Structures are given as C-alpha cells and as structure tokens.
C-alpha cells in the first residue's frame, strides 16, 4: 500500500523521475502536481510532470500528449503486448471531479482492450484537505477509483538523507490518514512489487 519514490526511479528510470522529486518531497499539502509515468514490458519509458493550472493536475495529465500516446498504444497493440504499468503520482488524493476523470479514462482504455494485464496505479502523498474525508476526497471517491481498476498507493517521498524504506510512521500526517482510510475500507492493493 506504500509506493516508495525510489521504486518509481528504479522502474521508470532515475534520469526520468529524479528531476521531479523536489516537487513531491517539498510540496505543501495544498500543492498540486501529477507525475504521469509510462512503462511497458518492451522497455518503453516516458515521464511527464503536470502542475495544476485552471484545471487540477490529474486533468492536465489526462489531457496531455503522453496520455494520448498511451491511449493510441492500447488501441494499436496486437496480441496483448507489450503490457503497461502506468503510475499517476500526485501530491494529494483526487477530489470527486478528478475521480470522475480518472474513472472515465480507464473506461475508455477498457473499450480498446486495455486493463487485461496492464496496471494503473494512482499514488498520492496523502488525503486532499479535510480530516473527516467528507468534502474533498471522500470515502466514495476512494471506492470509485478502486472499483474502476486504479490500484491505490500512498506515495512515500522522504527528504534526502532519510531512510528510504517506507513505514507508516514515516509518512506525513495526511499520508497516514490516506493509508488508514485505504486499509480501513478495504480499498488497498498490494505493494507494487514489479516496480
């Protein structure tokens, strides 16, 4: 349920992922960044950072050229290969509007034959805003993402010089809050060992 930043670097490539680490390590609770990471079983790798603008960062990622290339690859692949691992690393869990965008994005890929053997991971540093999880990120949002096929993880982004092995105690308070909610309501997925 905890995705360490170093696993993103290891799977997608340190040279592609590491330049964006500071956006996540030093981000405030209200900062919004989305790092869309694409990797396939044939060795293809691509990473792109999306800050929030007039739209939330998740929406910017799903409207990007990189997402369009992922969509095209799913539609054009033959006999199910290469398999993909897509990770959307975000500073805070998705609001109800972004949850809808993420659900629809996977539904579209499913119509093209995606999801069979592919992995789609959303990894947030913690919950968005309120402690009760009833106005920004709600329990229903977590349930909808889980049911849509998004594997949900808590992104572990320690500062340099801090232990890289993830622990619940090492998460920021809003990260522990997300971890506990995913665990309590059964929306957790196994640690992403292939990363």
Image (spheres, rainbow, N blue to C red):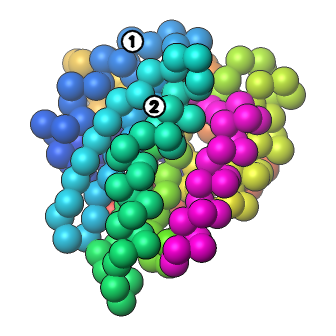
- Look at the image and give the residue range highlighted in magenta: 92-113
Q: Position of residue 186 (x, y in %)?
A: 74, 55
Any part of residue 85 in sight: yes
Q: Position of residue 145 (x, y in %)?
A: 68, 51
Q: Would residue 40 be found to the left or right of residue 138 on screen?
A: left
The quarter of the picture where residue 34 lies is: top left
In this view, 178 is above or below 32: below
Mark 1: few/some/many CA within 10 Å (<14, 14-19, 20+): few
Q: Position of residue 19 (x, y in %)?
A: 21, 25
Residue at x 62%, y 32% (from the top left corner) = 93
User: Which label belongs to residue 34?
Assistant: 2
Q: Identify residue for label 1.
A: 26
Residue at x 37%, y 44% (from the top left corner) = 65
- Of residue 75 and residue 87, the one placed in the foreground of this image is 75
Identify the element where label 2 is drawn: strand
The quarter of the picture where residue 137 lies is: top right
Gap between marks 2 and 1 measured at Cα: 14 Å
Is 100 magenta? The answer is yes
């Amino acid at each position: 349920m905890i995705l360490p930043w170093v696993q993103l670097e290891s799977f997608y490539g340190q040279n592609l992922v590491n330049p964006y680490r500071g956006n996540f390590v030093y981000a405030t609770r209200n900062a919004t960044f989305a790092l869309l990471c694409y990797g396939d079983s044939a060795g293809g790798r691509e990473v792109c950072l999306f800050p929030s603008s007039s739209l939330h960062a998740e929406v910017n990622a799903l409207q990007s050229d990189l997402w369009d290339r992922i969509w095209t690859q799913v539609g054009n692949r033959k006999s199910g290969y290469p398999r993909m691992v897509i990770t959307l690393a975000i500073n805070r869990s998705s609001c109800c509007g972004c949850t809808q965008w993420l659900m629809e994005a996977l539904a579209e890929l499913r119509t093209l034959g995606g999801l069979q053997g592919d992995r789609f991971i959303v990894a947030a540093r913690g919950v968005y805003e309120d402690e009760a999880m009833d106005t920004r990120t709600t329990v229903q949002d977590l349930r909808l993402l889980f049911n849509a096929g998004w594997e949900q993880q808590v992104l572990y982004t320690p500062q340099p010089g801090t232990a890289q092995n993830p622990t619940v105690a090492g998460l920021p308070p809003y990260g522990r809050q997300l971890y506990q909610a995913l665990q309590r309501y059964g929306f957790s997925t196994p640690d992403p060992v292939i990363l």
